Amino acid sequence: MLSALGRKKSTLKVPLRRGWCPTPEQNKVIGNLREMIASIRVSDAHGFFWVLHCKHKLQRIYTQNVDAMESRLGIPAVKFPNHRLIHGGYVTLQGDFTQLRCSHCSKTTYFSKMYVKCFQSGAAPSCPSCIARGAYLMIFIICTSANYF
């Protein structure tokens, strides 16, 4: 897949081949990164976005950040970013570290502390919806580098 700038994209949401599963080392990195992201402090820029949102002056935020800081501030995510009416909210261009997606049924679930501990142990958590099929949960982020890990 090519981006708008013509750069090759790789994704963590789509396996490179059927049966692909992240390695235990990759799972540990994902768990530790999620824990680090959850402890990040709000920046002055995000505080400014919050002030604009409260005053109904914020039109839209398009972000490549995966920390979901806008969500933590209470700024709503935009469900349909192509909507003609632009008023408030934020759009994640690459996804974020708050959602996990099933490798089989594509159902999304919140990346809770329980899943963080599972990833930190090196295991990929099972999907609660299709546990009998051996499906696992993975992060849903589009990376712009072909060599992410």
Image: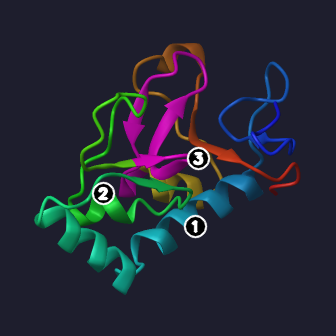
**Quarter placement of the C terminus:** bottom right
- Indicate whether residue 36 is drawn in magenta: no
**As displayed, is residue 46 above or below residue 69?**
below
Q: Which residues make up the magenta segment?
A: 91-114
Q: Is residue 113 magenta?
A: yes
Q: Which residue is mark 3?
A: 94
Describe the element under mark 2 as helix, strand or loop. helix
Residue type beneath disc 2: Ser
Q: Give the quadrant of residue 20.
A: top right
On screen, residue 14 versus residue 130, left or right, reads: right
* Disc marking residue 33: 1
Q: Hey, which residue is sitting farthest left in the picture?
A: 55
- Residue 64, horizontal then vertical, whole percent: 56, 57
Asked if the residues shown at circle 2 and circle 3 are in contact, with their CB atoms under 8 angstroms apart, the answer is: no
Q: From what the image shows, is residue 15 above or below residue 133?
A: below
Residue shown at 79%/22% (left/top)?
A: 19
Quadrant location of the N terminus in the rendered image: top right
Q: Residue at x 28, y 33 (%)?
A: 85
Q: Are marks 3 and 1 in contact (CB under 8 Å)?
A: no
Residue 8 in percent (x, y) is at 87, 41
The first of marks 2 and 3 along the sequence is 2
Tell me the kind of residue under disc 3: Gln
What residue is shown with label 2? 71
Image coordinates for residue 62, horizontal then vertical, percent:
47, 53
On the image, the x and y values in percent for residue 2 come to 82, 35
Question: 17 or 128: nearer the eye?
Answer: 17
**The residue tagged with tag 3: helix, strand or loop?**
loop
